[in-house]
Image: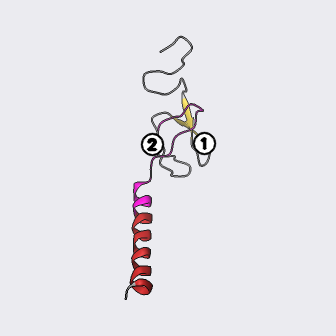
Amino acid sequence: MSKGDTRTGSGSYGFVTKKCPECYAHLPLQTRKCPSCNTKIGDVDKLGFATRPFDWWGYLIAIISIVGLCWFIWWGFLKE
């Protein structure tokens, strides 16, 4: 790390709190869920906001829905 780098070993960028990306409440760095809006939050980014965790279930359901729609279109209109 260089002299001007404010990051600590935990990646907290020198911040003592982080902001919820949904309701902008100030939270301790160890918090994983915002008590104000019940949003899951991750580590702090370089601007002091908490990152949002990746929503695997949402993307999985979307992909399955798109595949199901394509199969229905094939079955209903293109199958001879």
Locate the C terminus and report the quarter of the image it occupies. bottom left
In depth, the one of 59 and 71 nearer the eye is 71
Please indicate whether residue 7 sits to the left or right of residue 71 in the image.
right
Question: What secondary structure predominates along the stretch shown in magenta?
Answer: loop
Q: Position of residue 28 (x, y in %)?
A: 51, 34
The vertical placement of 65 against 25, above or below, is below
Q: Residue 20: within the magenta?
A: no
Please indicate whether residue 22 sits to the left or right of residue 69 in the image.
right
Question: Which residue shows up at 58% across the image and 45% down it?
Answer: 21
Q: How many marks?
A: 2
Q: Which residues are magenta?
A: 43-60
Question: Which residue shows up at 44% across the image and 53% down it?
Answer: 55
The residue at which mark 2 appears reads as 32
Tag of residue 50: none
The vertical placement of 48 against 36, above or below, is above
The residue at which mark 1 appears reads as 25
Q: Position of residue 47 (x, y in %)?
A: 60, 32
Q: Farthest residue to the top: give it.
A: 3
Q: Position of residue 74 (x, y in %)?
A: 41, 80
